[in-house]
Image (cartoon, helix red, strand yellow):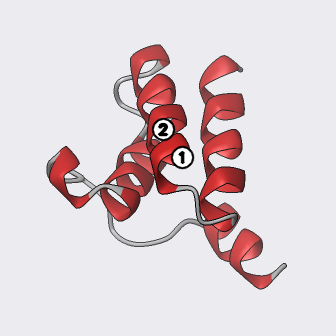
Amino acid sequence: MLYEAQYYLGRCYERQGNDRLAAERFQAALIAKPDYHKARSALKRVDPTAGPARGIEGASEDDNALEQN
């Protein structure tokens, strides 16, 4: 799915420390799927001015796995 590809590309940019490009990819994921909570949470993490991450209860398993690698 396109929204997932945008999200994971954003995660790669985030891990590299490029928050601007990460935010762009998370926003692209949200355009493709507005209710994609993982992208909304990630966008809030890299750009706190992006607004509240509604309905997020913490990191997902995918987020945790990426942090461990």
Residue beneath disc 1: 22
Q: Position of residue 64 (x, y in %)?
A: 65, 76
Q: Nearest the camera: 35 or 17?
A: 17
Residue 20 relative to residue 64: left or right: left
Q: Nearest the camera: 14 or 18?
A: 18
Residues marked 2 and 1 touching at CB (< 8 Å)? yes
Instruction: In the displayed orientation, state which residue is furthest to the right.
Output: 69
Q: Position of residue 17 (x, y in %)?
A: 60, 66
Assign a secondary structure to mark 2.
helix
The answer for how far apart the CA atoms under marks 2 and 1 are is 6 Å
- Vertical relation: 32 (above or below) 11: above
Residue 54 relative to residue 40: left or right: left
Q: Position of residue 29 (x, y in %)?
A: 51, 28
Residue beneath disc 2: 26
Mark sitting on residue 5: none
User: In front: mark 2 or mark 1?
Assistant: 1
Q: Nearest the camera: 69 or 46?
A: 46
The disc labelled 1 sits on which kind of residue? Ala
Assign a secondary structure to mark 1.
helix
Q: Identify which residue is drawn at 33% across, 68% down.
A: 57
Residue 40 relative to residue 38: left or right: left
